Each structure stands twice: as structure tokens, then as C-alpha cells.
Amino acid sequence: MTQPTETTNTQKRCFVIMGFGIKTDFATGRKLDLNKSYKLLIKPVAEQKGLLCVRADEILHSGSIDYQMYKELLNADVVIADLSTANVNAFYELGIRHALRKRNTIVISEDKLGYPFDLNHIKITSYTHLGEAIDYEEVERFRKVLGDTIDAVLNIDEPDSPVYSHLHELTPPLTKKDAPGLIKRMNIFYRGKSQRDQIQEVTGPDVDNPTLAVLMEQGEAAMHSRDYVNAKVLFETALKLIKDEANNDAYLMQRLAFATYKAKVPDVLTALDEAMGLLSKLDIEHTNDTETVSLAGRIEKKLHEMGHGSHHLASAIQFFARGYFLLQNRYHGVNLAFLLNKRADSILSETNEDRIADMVWASRFRRQVVKICEKDWIEINDRKNRMASKMSTEDSAMPSDYMEAEDNEQIFWILANKAECHYGLGEMQEYREAHAKALAADHTEWMLKAYEEQHVVLREILKKHGHLLNPAWKGEE
């Protein structure tokens, strides 16, 4: 994050109410990357309108973050509240803003949010979120909509707060600083100060202290470069900023657990146990947070692979089954099928009937995953083709917001998952075609290694128990 720059003495502020990181929408089971919503849809528009835009995780603070947040809710010239995933903190903070200020509050959400009864009289501007991605065409559309909305709220006198709309005699509160001169506007608190001074006024003098946002960005960068040891330190530091362990943010805990598991420090087993201990704080036995469930499944799967008992295999199956039934996605489905095959080859399947059941259910899940792969393939290629067409017709460069590397990684995994499913179903021609396409797609060494290692184990299980299927499984000719 760059250091704040000088700004005009009349620059207004925009405070954004929303979660951060990847959050689970429990109504649909989908994972939404709220950082992308903020960085692609909200912050660029606010800054284009000349607003100093800040989210809670970007606030520098040496004391209570709650104090700084309440101060922003009172003083910000514009507040944008993103209610996606029905975040209870966002609803609470929106209520406080509506109580403190008559106007200049904008409510947005991704379009699958169920309209809350208590907000059915408030306009919610919607955008389309694809899960962990946002279509660039949607970025362009929503930026214009949000920009027009900001222009509108800054130029109207009618209240948008339902509190002041119904209680006409109510007067907004004033701070002690404002009370002696009632003619002062709320935003006079910031006039005549640089952006750096504005931030320090709100957050304390130590501008060199990293914000939560900076720590998370550095942690994600370390994860991307597979520097898991440093990622672990960064996410641990980020969690310390929250301080209240009873209310640890799920996203940060998940990222710390993942970094811990991958760091393998001081050794693999200790790291896995530590990571599972972190996830236990997120109620892994009952949660429907698919990211928590997925991580727990991965860790239990790894513990079983290391030979630490069949109970880890049973737990891994439970976690991947929960994740698959919540999300109906490729990742959980292909791993659930694989683990059912492993159970058929373990002491957990005590009878031939048990083994047949596991083998049959694995095949059923694979047929479902093949259809999911085909659907995902169409969607991702449609998006890439639209982008290519847009760039050619407008004679412009690929926009920096477009995450081409992420699309390419997903293309590999769609093909790899499809190949594994066809192989498990004994459909060798389809397997060879998908396998060849996966090898030709962009991929990293670790991606190919993970795919091939699972394939080797699956092949041995199917050779051993494939005869239990009807028709019997037949491998490579």
C-alpha cells in the first residue's frame, strides 16, 4: 500500500461497510471474494469521484478499532454498505449510520442476497458476483451505476435514512467538537488537512504500523509465491489486530490454518495438528462455512495419507460430503468420490456390500462432476471469448482488472477433474482426451503433481476393486 498523498482541503470521505476476504453466503453455500468486490467495484469509483475511500481493515489504529469505526460512521460524507453474504456486522453498522446521519448512505449487495424484511423499504443496488470472480463486463456496468448513485446522494437534501424519514423532528447528533458552533458541518473535522493527517487524526500517529488490509495483502502475496512460513507470520499478526479471540474473523483464521498446514513447521504432523486446532475455533463439527469444511477435509485427508489412522479418512469423507452437498462443485465432488474409493479399500468397509456401496456412490458422484465440469467449461470460455472480442473491437489492451491467470488455472482443473472422473468411470477414450487437454493447458508443476499423485492411488484401487462395479471397471488397454 502506498503512503497517503496530499489532497485538497475540501476532499470528502467515503467509508465502506462490508466484510473482507472470502466469505461464505450461508443462504446459498457459495464463497464470495469480498476483497474483489471492494477493489474492483467500490474503491475505484469512490476515488474517481474525488472521495478518500477507506474500509475498516485499511484503518491505521493503535487503540480500539471500534472507536475508529464509529467515528467514520458519524463523520464520513458518504457511506457505502455492502450487505453481501448477509453479514451481521454490516447490518449492525448500517443501522448505526442510519441513526447518526440523515443522508448519503448507499446500500449495495450481490444479486442473490435475500431481501431482508426490515430493509424492504430501502433501495439496494445489486451487482452480480460469480463467487470468487466478477465478470469484467459486470465491473464496467456496476461502476457506472455506483458512480451515478454517488453523484445523486451528494446532491440531494432528502434523507435516505429510514430513521429520519419517519422521525421528522429528530436532529442528528453532534460531537463535542461540533457543539460550540452549530453551523459546522460534520465533515469540517477533516478540512485543511492532508490525507496523511486525516488518517492520523482518525487512527493515531504511527502511520508506519501496517493496517489489517496491508497484512492480508502481504499474506496473500506470500501464499501466492508459496512462502507459507512468512504467510503464517503475517496472518498471525493480522489476527492479533482483532485481539478478541472469541470473535476471530473466520477468513483470517482459515488463511492462518491453511498457511500453517502448508508451512510444515516444525514438522508436517505438528503443523497439521496445529491447523486443525485453529479450525476447531470455527466450530468445524457444525459449521456450514464451506471454506472451513474444505480445509478440514484437506487436513484429515492428509493425515490419513500419512498413515495416522482410518478415523481421519472417515472424517475427511464427512467434511467433503458436507462441502459437496452445500456447493455442488467440482473440487468437493471429485475428492469425495476419490475418498469413497479409498474407504472401499480400507478397514472401514467391513463387508463386500460396504465396498460395493462405496464404489457405486463414487461413480454416481463422478457422473455429476462430469456435468459440472462441462457447465464450468462453457462459462469460463464464454467469459474469455467475450473479453477477447471486446478487446479486438475496441482496439484496447486487456484491462488490469481481468484475472487471466486465475481463469487459466481453473481451465486446467476443469480438464484434470474431468479426466479423473472419466478414468474412475472406466471411460478411457474420454479420459485420454481430457488428460491430453489438461497437459496442454497452462499449469504449474505443483498442480500437475497433485493431479498425478491422486491418479496413481486411484488406479491401484480401481484395479483391485473395479470388478465390484456393474459393468466392471476396465482400465487402460
Image (cartoon, rainbow, N blue to C red):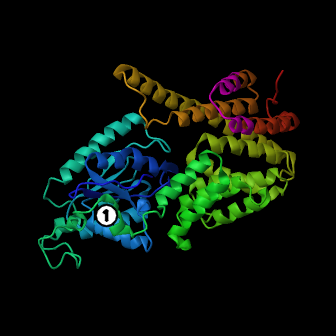
In the rendered view, tell whether residue 117 sits above or below residue 396: below
Report the side of 162 relative to 343 (left or right). Answer: left
Residue at 80% x, 45% y is 342
Question: Measured from the top left, where is residue 33 in percent x and y?
Answer: 48, 49
Residue shown at 68%/58% (left/top)? Answer: 260
Disc 1 marks which amino acid?
A: Gln
Q: Tell me if mark 1 has few (under 14), some (14-19) or many (20+) residues whose alpha carbon lies within 10 angstroms of its own.
A: some
Question: Which residue position is annotated with label 1?
Answer: 198
Residue visible at 43% across and 74% down in the picture: 64
Q: Main secondary structure of the magenta part?
A: helix
Whether residue 444 is in magenta: the answer is yes
Q: How many numbered discs, if any?
A: 1
Q: Which residues are magenta?
A: 433-450
* Residue at screen point 65% across, 32% down: 443
Dividing the picture into quadrants, the one containing residue 398 is top left
**Where residue 429 sits: x, y (%)?**
73, 20
Q: Nearer the viewer, residue 380 or 340?
A: 380
On the rendered image, what quadrant is the C terminus found in?
A: top right
**In this view of the protein, which residue sits in the foreground, 336 or 269?**
269
130 or 1, nearer to the observer: 1
Q: Position of residue 15 (x, y in %)?
A: 32, 59
User: With 473 as the anchor, is 222 left or right in this view?
Assistant: left
Q: Is residue 329 left or right of residue 389?
A: right
- The reply to whether residue 318 is in sight is no
Where residue 148 appears, x then y in whole percent? Answer: 23, 44
On whether residue 71 falls in the magenta region, the answer is no
Answer yes or no: is residue 364 visible: yes
Secondary element at image label 1: helix
